[in-house]
Image (cartoon, rainbow, N blue to C red):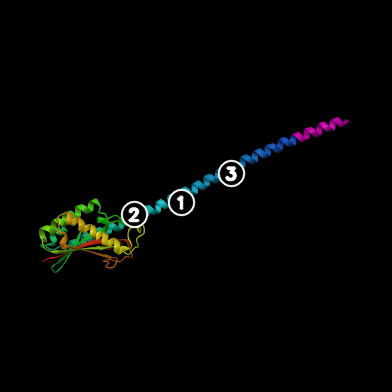
Amino acid sequence: MTRWSGNGFTTLATLCFAAVSVLGGCTTTTERQLWHQNTELQQRLDRAYDENARLSRELADLRSELERAKAELGAAREQGQRGQADRPAEGPLGDFEGIRGVDTQRDGDEVTVRVPGDILFAPGRASLNDAARRTLSEVADVLQRRYPRGTIRVVGHTDSDPIRATADRWRDNHHLSQARAQTVRDYLSERGVPGNRMRVVGRGPDEPVASNESAAGKARNRRVEIIVQKQ
C-alpha cells in the first residue's frame, strides 16, 4: 500500500489547484470571446435593420413618383383627346391648338387657353420650367398676331392639397396660384404682349375642373388659364 507523506499531500493539492486555475482561465477567455462575437453580431443586425428601413423609404418614394408620372400621362392623353374632339375646322382656336400640351376652349368672343401647371412649374414652385418658356412663347406669338387688342386675364389654379415642402414661401394655395399667374403674365410681357392688357388672378383650389380625389384629377386642376376677350 502506498503511503502519502505530508509533503506528498501538499504537492497533490498544489497540482489540483493549478489545474482548476487553468480551466477557469480558459472558461473566462471563451466567455469573453463569445460576448464580443455576440456584440458584433448585434451591431451588424442593427445596421441591417437601418439599411432595410432606408431602402423601404426609397421604394415608397419611387412608387409615389411612378404614380405621379402615370397620372400626368393620363391627364395629358385626356387633354389631347378632348382637344381633338373640340377642334373646329377653322377659326381663332386653330393657332392655339397647334401648341403642344395646351387645351383651348371658346365661349362666344372669349377664348380660354389652359396650360397644365405641371408643364409650367415644379411642385410648390412659381418659377418657369424650360419647357414652359417654349410653350408660353408660342402662346404670346398667337396673342400678338390674332388678338392684338383683346383684354387678357391670367388665372392661376391649384389642387386641394395643402402646401408642405414650400410652406415657408407661400401662405396657402391662393398665394401660390397668384404668384404663378404673375410669373406667366411677366413672361408674356417679356415676349411682347403689352402688360396693360393683362390682369392677374389667383383662384387657388376654388375652381376645380376635375375631382381632387384622384391623382389624375389633381393634375388637371393644377393649371394656369389665359383668358382672352376679343375686341
Q: Which mark is residue 53?
A: 1
Gap between marks 2 and 1 measured at Cα: 20 Å
| Amino acid found under the numbered disc labelled 2 | Leu
Residue 21 falls left or right of residue 41: right
Between discs 2 and 1, the one toward the N terminus? 1
Quadrant where the C terminus sits is bottom left
- Relative to 27, say whether 60 is above or below: below
Looking at the picture, tell me which residue is in the foreground, 171 or 38. Answer: 171
Query: On the image, numbered disc 3 is attached to which residue?
Result: 38
Q: Position of residue 196 (x, y in %)?
A: 16, 61
Q: Main secondary structure of the magenta part?
A: helix
Residue 75 falls left or right of residue 197: right
Q: Position of residue 137 (x, y in %)?
A: 17, 54
Q: Which residues are magenta?
A: 1-18
- Relative to 12, say whether 162 is above or below: below
Label 1 sits on a secondary structure element that is: helix
Within-10-Å neighbours for mark 2: few <14, some 14–19, many 20+: few
Please check the rendered image and state whether residue 17 is part of the magenta-colored stretch, yes or no. yes
| Amino acid found under the numbered disc labelled 1 | Ala
Within-10-Å neighbours for mark 1: few <14, some 14–19, many 20+: few
Please check the rendered image and state whether residue 59 is part of the magenta-colored stretch, yes or no. no
Query: On the image, numbered disc 2 is attached to which residue?
Result: 66
